[in-house]
């Protein structure tokens, strides 16, 4: 290793235009993913506002019932396939190569193609609002036979475009997953064995493995749905001898693990952020890392818990109840590890730290309602009610989206070279936490009282909690304003960031902010210890002092 | 967690933590009682079993959530870095004994919940035998009932887009309002004419998807007189939300006289909010997006009255 | 997860954003594992629909003729052997023998495809004839698509073999194509057992 030439002089950052072209640089693609995802997040959020506007009164009076069904279907589809998956893939692109010291992803052009599919299928999905008959309106599950009813009889209809978009999203995700897994397996820095790898990389590896195993099942199921819808087969049509419940197996075989695809990287984010701002090593690093793969294994054998009322046999109900409950164990290991990390630490309540703590509280709550949902007798009562909607939104918004926000604030200086504003960030965090709880907590009593999900009107006894939930939703809508303001103004004119503003340990923090195009280039440092060595005083890599000294000198010169 | 990871085990800490745990136990116990108020009235033999399990889970959940929250509040209050303190904390990397403890305890806990839930599940046994049928020609079949039960009343439930029809084969009665005798076992035979529906009566804690091409039997005993709501719980298209019906549980005598009266009444169109709204929609200039037209309302003896107040 | 040892990849460091030849095979194997799940989904769908069906075969259909498909099967499976022979010769740098056996493999693959097409033409049911027709055409069609892809890949590799020195340092494309071909064969064995043997 030739320290004398390291690190390379930072190149002048290329102009804004590179974010609008076919770049093969993972750091550009990562930001493209995240910005695109937030564009669709705004659309999905707008649809959520319409949903909560309709539900603020018992009668169906804001939009027509058919339109309402389309809107809630598109809200779910957009938020999952066009917001949360792309935003996480954006973080993967930014963090995986820099955290493992790779110059880029293993297949840079495949990476470009995978990203550019997102706007393609996004446009396809949004276009379905404008085809005759309106968008898909059978829910984001698209259970047949409802999803096969094509009232106008056109070949190009909302449901058709929906299936195409979901299939393309699957292709994009598989391309991404092959890339991420290969990169992590083959391109780690010298000395960076698996048990020296940051937990974010562990969870990304686990999540992407799930994608590889689960997604093809959904794609297979979707192909059969498309053939039933448009080409006259009857895989799921009962009148032709088909079985509508078969689709549910295909769908949930992927779509339950999909929740772990979302939450595992967020566990990774928690595991990265808590040590930095508690100034302590991650408690039980090895257990936290390995628990990710136990979650993968169990996550693949729990899908029938979505189908307890679908008419599955009693033995299947018992079996899948037990496997579902078991997931609480590795998840608990992680939660306790984070508490152990915080315990006795020297906490710094920065914006990312606050987002992670809020996300952890919401996640524990969601975990408890999750165990309730796993038990068949209770699930029979509350499945397909607002209890499930509440539980799901606690996981996805309360925990996952808050984790994503934490990650954005935490790594913003690294990849933009600018510091975000703390004041706006904390306001954003407060509004998000209060808004999410106000919005999603009332859904639990509603579900327990027996209000089904996906309704456009409801009995008057449900009105009180629905008003609260809608007010919470509007607050959540407002919470995005300080976020956007912060991102825009910080990126344009925020104070310049040093290479390691949070005093964090990790390969990515040994790069200039923003990192040069090929990261460490040919001078990848040799990793000599475990991650999260806070308080131990041990260096992470060989010649760490020299590397940091050079970075500091560069910053002074700039 | 709170006690074991604190380094100096002095008496004050032990007493303090024990007191706090005691407080959490009390809180959990109180929440278990409260949880019954969040649920609808108990109107079937299944309800107390389900509610008991739910209340047990609420107690455990409250305790776990309270404990985690306590730790978080504690560290937020007492483990904050001083201003201008840039130093790191003690580099504690982990503790294998603790890992074993907090793997084993949750494992035992969730398995205990699972065992309890399975036991409840088998006592409920709501799901009867399931038969595949040819569409539009339900096969008559004998259900397998628990031997200690009385021969149950049988009700055929036919779900459509978007109405519920109830047939009483023994009495030759059809209705769009479900009438049941109190304290008598009843078997529902669920079929669907078109898409998936969900047969959901919150007061009974009963939910079962209705699957086209299958006849599904579910058994249950209503235990409380009153008027309840039946809701469609599996999304079934445009008027899914309006696909509701009333369930009237009455004394055996009232039930029999209702059946007798009903049998004497002429057939008339049953309730279907969807049909009524569809008519209004056709007259609108901006009718919304494409929809399947509702099935014509079933011809029944008793349409029922949906405007009567139902028990929450 | 082969080992927890650090994997030092000097060639990566030399090519910051170019192609990483040795990663291609890793990526391809990962992709094949994922691809096999689609087949698994279709197979399990077939099995579930078949076991729960009231009338499995469409009216007028007695069952499938299995003798000609068996011959096709033998040809397809043998082609797994010829492709191995071809690879063997490539490793010994006997390029013309490699091309010969490679071409033979392609011919056997094409024979299978033609046989499949002829069988489809002679059948008394279409893909909309109940779940049997649907799953039959779905499975054989999706597999046929893979066979066609395999033949196409082999054509590309064959053309590439005429680029001077292209295969001198070992060619991952040939290895990947061969792997894909074995994959397609294994899938066919399961498919044949499911559709033709289990009647």
Image: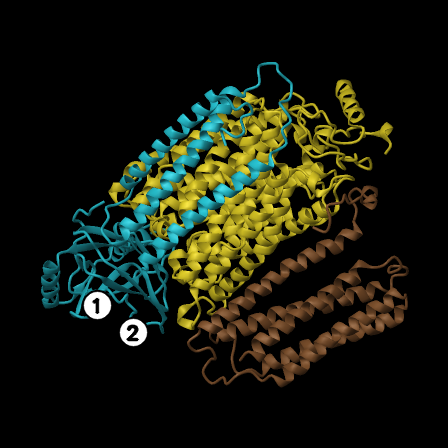
Say if residue A299 shows up in the picture.
yes
Residue drawn 73% across the image and 54% down it: C26
Residue drawn 29% across the image and 46% down it: A458
How is this picture coloured?
A: by chain
> Which residue corresponds to mark 2?
B141
> Which residue corresponds to mark 1?
B151
C8 or A169, which is in the foreground? C8
Using the image, name the chain to which the residue with label 2 belongs: B
Say if residue A62 shows up in the picture.
no
Question: Hue of chain A?
Answer: yellow
Q: Position of residue A305 (x, y in %)?
A: 44, 54
Question: Hue of chain C?
Answer: brown
> Of tags 1 and 2, which is closer to the observer?
1
Label 1 element class: loop
Q: Are marks 1 and 2 in contact (CB under 8 Å)?
A: no
Q: Would you say A71 lies left or right of C1 here? A: left
Q: Quadrant of residue C192?
A: bottom right
Chain cyan in the figure, letter: B
Mark 1 or mark 2: whose residue is earlier in sequence = 2
Residue drawn 67% across the image and 47% down it: A180
Using the image, name the chain to which the residue with label 1 belongs: B
In the picture, the quarter occupied by the C terminus of chain B is: top left
Q: Position of residue A327 (x, y in %)?
A: 51, 47
B114 or B36, which is in the foreground? B114
Disc 1 residue crowd, few under 14, some 14–19, many 20+, Cα 10 Å = few
Q: Is residue C98 above or below residue B4?
A: below
């Amino acid at each position: 290793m030739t320290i004398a030439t390291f690190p390379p002089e930072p190149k002048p950052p290329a102009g804004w235009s590179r974010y609008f072209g076919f770049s093969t640089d993972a750091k550009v693609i990562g930001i493209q993913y995240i910005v695109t995802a937030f564009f669709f997040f705004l659309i999905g959020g707008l649809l959520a506002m319409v949903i909560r506007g309709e539900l603020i009164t018992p009668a169906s009076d804001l939009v027509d019932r058919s339109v309402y069904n389309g809107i809630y279907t598109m809200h779910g589809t957009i938020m999952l396939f066009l917001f949360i998956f792309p935003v996480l893939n954006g973080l993967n692109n930014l963090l995986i190569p820099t955290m493992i010291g790779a110059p880029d992803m293993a297949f840079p052009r495949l990476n470009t193609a995978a990203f550019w599919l997102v706007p393609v299928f996004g446009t396809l999905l949004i276009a379905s609002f404008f085809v005759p008959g309106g968008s898909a309106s059978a829910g984001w599950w698209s259970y047949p036979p409802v999803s096969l009813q094509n009232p106008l009889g056109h070949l190009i209809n909302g449901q058709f475009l929906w299936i195409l978009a979901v299939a393309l999203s699957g292709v994009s995700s598989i391309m991404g997953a092959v890339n991420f897994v290969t990169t992590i397996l083959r391109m780690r820095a010298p000395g960076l064995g698996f048990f020296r790898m940051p937990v974010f990389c562990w969870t990304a590896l686990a999540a992407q493995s799930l994608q590889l195993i689960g997604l093809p099942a959904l794609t297979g199921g979707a192909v059969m749905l498309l053939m039933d819808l448009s080409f006259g087969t009857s895989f799921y049509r009962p009148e032709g001898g088909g079985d509508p419940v078969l689709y549910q197996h295909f769908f949930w075989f992927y779509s339950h693990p999909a929740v772990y695809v979302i939450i595992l990287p967020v566990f990774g984010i928690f595991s990265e952020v808590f040590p930095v701002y508690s100034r302590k090593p991650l408690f039980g690093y090895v257990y936290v890392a390995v628990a990710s793969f136990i979650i993968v294994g169990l996550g693949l054998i729990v899908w029938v818990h979505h189908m307890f009322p679908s008419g599955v046999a009693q033995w299947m109900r018992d079996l899948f109840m037990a496997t579902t409950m078991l997931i609480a164990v590795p998840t608990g290991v992680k939660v306790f590890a984070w508490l152990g990390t915080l315990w006795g630490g020297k906490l710094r309540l920065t914006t990312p730290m606050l987002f992670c703590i809020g996300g952890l509280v919401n996640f524990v709550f969601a975990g408890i309602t999750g165990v309730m949902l796993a038990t068949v007798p209770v699930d029979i009562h509350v499945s397909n009610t607002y209890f499930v909607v509440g539980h799901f939104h606690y996981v996805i918004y309360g925990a996952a989206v808050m984790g994503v926000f934490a990650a954005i604030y935490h790594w913003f200086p690294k990849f933009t070279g600018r510091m975000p504003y703390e004041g706006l960030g904390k306001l954003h965090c407060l509004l998000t936490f209060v808004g999410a709880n106000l919005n999603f907590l009332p859904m639990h009593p509603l579900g327990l009282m027996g209000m089904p999900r996906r309704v456009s009107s409801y009995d008057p006894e449900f009105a009180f909690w629905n008003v609260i939930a809608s007010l919470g939703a509007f607050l959540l809508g407002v919470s995005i304003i300080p976020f956007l303001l912060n991102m825009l103004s910080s990126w344009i004119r925020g104070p310049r960031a040093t290479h390691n503003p949070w005093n964090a340990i990790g390969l990515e923090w040994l790069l200039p902010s923003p990192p040069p195009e090929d990261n460490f280039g040919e001078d990848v440092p040799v990793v000599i210890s475990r991650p999260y060595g806070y308080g131990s005083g041990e260096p992470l890599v060989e010649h760490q002092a020299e590397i940091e000294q050079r970075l500091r000198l560069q910053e002074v010169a700039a | 967690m709170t006690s074991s990871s604190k380094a100096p085990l002095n008496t004050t800490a032990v007493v303090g933590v024990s007191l706090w745990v005691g407080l959490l136990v009390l809180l959990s116990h109180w929440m278990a009682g409260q949880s019954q108020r969040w649920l609808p009235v108990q109107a079937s033999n299944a309800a107390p079993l389900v509610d008991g399990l739910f209340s047990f889970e609420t107690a455990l959940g409250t305790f776990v959530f309270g404990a985690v929250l306590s730790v978080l509040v504690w560290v937020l209050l007492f483990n904050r870095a001083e201003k201008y303190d840039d130093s790191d904390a003690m580099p504690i990397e982990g503790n294998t004994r603790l890992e074993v403890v907090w793997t084993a305890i949750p494992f035992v806990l969730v398995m205990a919940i699972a065992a309890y839930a399975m036991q409840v599940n088998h006592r409920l046994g709501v799901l009867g035998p399931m038969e595949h049928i040819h569409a539009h020609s339900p096969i008559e079949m004998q259900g397998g009932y628990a031997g200690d039960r009385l021969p149950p009343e049988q009700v055929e439930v036919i779900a459509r887009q978007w109405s519920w029809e109830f047939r009483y084969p023994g009495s030759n009665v059809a209705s769009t309002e479900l009438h049941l005798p109190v304290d008598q076992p009843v078997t529902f035979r669920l079929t669907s004419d078109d898409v998936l529906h969900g047969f959901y009566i919150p007061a009974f804690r009963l939910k079962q998807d209705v699957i086209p091409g299958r006849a599904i039997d579910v058994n249950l005993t209503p235990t409380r007189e009153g008027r309840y709501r039946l809701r469609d719980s599996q999304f079934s298209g445009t008027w899914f939300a309006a696909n509701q019906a009333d369930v009237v549980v009455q004394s055996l005598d009232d039930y029999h006289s209702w059946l007798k009266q009903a049998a004497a009444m002429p057939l008339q169109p049953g309730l279907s909010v969807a049909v009524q709204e569809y008519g209004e929609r056709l007259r609108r200039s901006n009718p919304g997006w494409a929809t399947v037209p509702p099935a014509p309302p079933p011809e029944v003896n008793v349409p029922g009255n949906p405007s009567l107040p139902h028990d929450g | 997860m082969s080992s927890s040892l650090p994997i030092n990849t000097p060639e990566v460091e030399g090519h910051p954003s170019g192609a990483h030849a040795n990663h291609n095979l890793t990526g391809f194997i990962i992709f094949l594992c994922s691809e096999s799940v689609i087949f698994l989904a279709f197979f399990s769908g077939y099995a579930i629909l078949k076991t729960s069906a009231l009338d499995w075969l469409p009216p007028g259909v007695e069952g499938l003729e299995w003798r000609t498909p068996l011959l096709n099967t033998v040809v397809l499976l043998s082609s797994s052997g010829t492709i191995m022979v071809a690879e063997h010769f490539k490793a010994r740098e006997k390029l013309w023998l490699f091309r010969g056996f490679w071409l033979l493999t392609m011919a056997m693959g094409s024979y299978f495809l033609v046989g499949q097409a002829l069988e489809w033409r002679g059948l008394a049911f279409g893909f909309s004839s109940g779940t049997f027709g649907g799953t039959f055409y779905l499975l054989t069609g999706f597999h046929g698509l893979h066979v066609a892809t395999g033949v196409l890949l082999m054509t590309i590799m064959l053309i590439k073999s005429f680029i001077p020195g292209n295969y001198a340092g070992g060619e991952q494309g040939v290895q990947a194509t061969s792997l894909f071909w074995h994959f397609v064969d294994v899938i066919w064995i399961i498919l044949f057992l499911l559709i033709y043997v289990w009647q």
